[in-house]
Amino acid sequence: MKHEDQPRDPAALKRHRHLFRAVRRRRTPKVRRSDITVTDEATVKRATKAAAVGNAMEWFDFGIYAYLAVTIGKVFFPAGSTQLLASFTAFAASFLVRPLGGLFFGPLGDRIGRKKVLALTMVLMAAGTFCIGLIPSYSSIGLASPVLLLVCRLVQGFSTGGEYGGAATFIAEYAPDKRRGFFGSFLELGTLAGYTGAAALVLVLNTALGDDMMLRWGWRIPFLVGGPIGVVGLYLRMRLDETPAFRKRAAQLSHSPEASAVEANEPRLSENVPQKELRSIFAEQWRTLLLCIGLVAAYNVTDYMLLSYMPAYLTDALGYENSMELVAAIIAMVAMAAVIQRVGHLNDRFGRKPVLMTGMVGFFVLTIPAFALFQQGSFGAVLLGLLALGACLVCLLGTMSATLPALFPTDVRYGSLSIGYNVATAVFGGTAPGVMTYLVDTTGDNLAPAYYASGAAVLGIVAVALMKETAQQPLAGSPPSVSTHEEARALARAETNQPTF
């Protein structure tokens, strides 16, 4: 039988068509030279600095509250044994509105741009911090005092809902693929700088003014300083252009390549496409959102335990002098800041998962021994315990800000990350100091916080095991980003010269 007379097999033809399409796809370069983003080193550094300063401002505010938690309890709440618990309850209350802030600011940042939303969150955060320093005490105005404190904390919490997700997205979309971990580590360097600055300022004021003057008016100074710091952060952020990934996405959705050149500084998706509804984010990204929540939950419990809860724990539960605890905390945070960029290099080179897993396993193994050291009553034991936990935390700090943005595609990155991050932070992070204080008060066991943190570390281990490696890879929904034109040409040649089979 001749070939043309043979009966046609529909299944065979279908297989052949798939084969021909695959061949055609392989013959077409996956990445065109014009699609590759070549980053400018100076611009990336300016963007990183602006995002990091804002993050430092955020954690300066939270650090002040944490390091003054005992004093704030005495100033804003009636006398009694529950002043510290009431202080941490107000601390946790601000986290309840963070998911609302994420729901509002995140999708807004995906529509009108990262830059404008980050500027707005900076203004709200600085205003809330400054106003706390102006609130009269409970002895002056009674119940209105804690109510006003709560209102300011809610403003801070709402603005913070758009801060971390936006700042992490901002740096991730500016950084080249092979150095995203390094540049992302600067965001958490801002975290450590904010906490260290808060601890140092409180230490200086405690030493210079004494307990009585601090209780009367000295506690106001750190909050009033937060206002000018916010103005500086706002200035740095307003001087930047929108991220390359967002500009490319805006041009694609407008079907106008020229739009990115004409509106390079102020692209807008909202004028060209309908708003992406929140239900579509949950419908399309729910698995990744759950993974994000698991990672952030474990990370935040350990983070808030070490950087927010520890000062009050050592002074209130264990009876250490406040100045001694602050000195130990400052030393530990400076040590973490000294190596965090190195951790960024390591996760760029070896991958995000190995570094994250090291930190999670470290917390599971070392938290209980570290808390046992705290019971010894000496400065050396406290410092050793803080350094051991700090070594685990810096593995998470130096890696997470590059890991989380890479979980989501460009068009929903800000919104999805803000929602997932803030839900986890509200439920697990902001409540951690209050839960740990409650556990100590109700059980009488000073190791109870360690058990809680170890349980969170188990959740983190599972989440890291389930996540995909994203180091040295383009962000989902974005073209490759490289540091030099030579690297771009090499990448384009490598894609073009791939074999057809």
Image: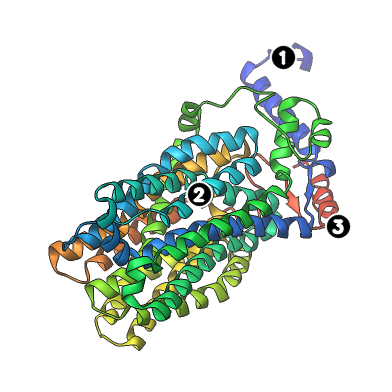
The answer to which of 240 and 248 lies nearer the viewer is 240
Which residue is located at x 49 percent, y 45 percent? 159
Determine if residue 96 is in view. yes
Q: Quadrant of the C terminus?
A: top right
Residue in view at x 29 percent, y 56 percent:
76
The alpha-carbon separation of the residues under discs 3 and 1 comes to 54 Å
Quick check: marks 3 and 1 in contact, CB under 8 Å? no
Tell me if residue 354 can be seen: no
Residue 68 placed where, x, y %? 36, 66
Q: Picture coordinates of residue 250 (x, y %)?
A: 71, 32
Of label 3 and label 1, which has the lower sequence position? 1
The residue at the point 29 percent across, 66 percent down is 70
Residue at the image point whose x is 71% and y is 43% from the top? 242
Q: Which residue is mark 1?
A: 6
Is label 2 in contact with label 1 (beta carbons under 8 Å)?
A: no
Q: For mark 2, what is the residue? A: 127
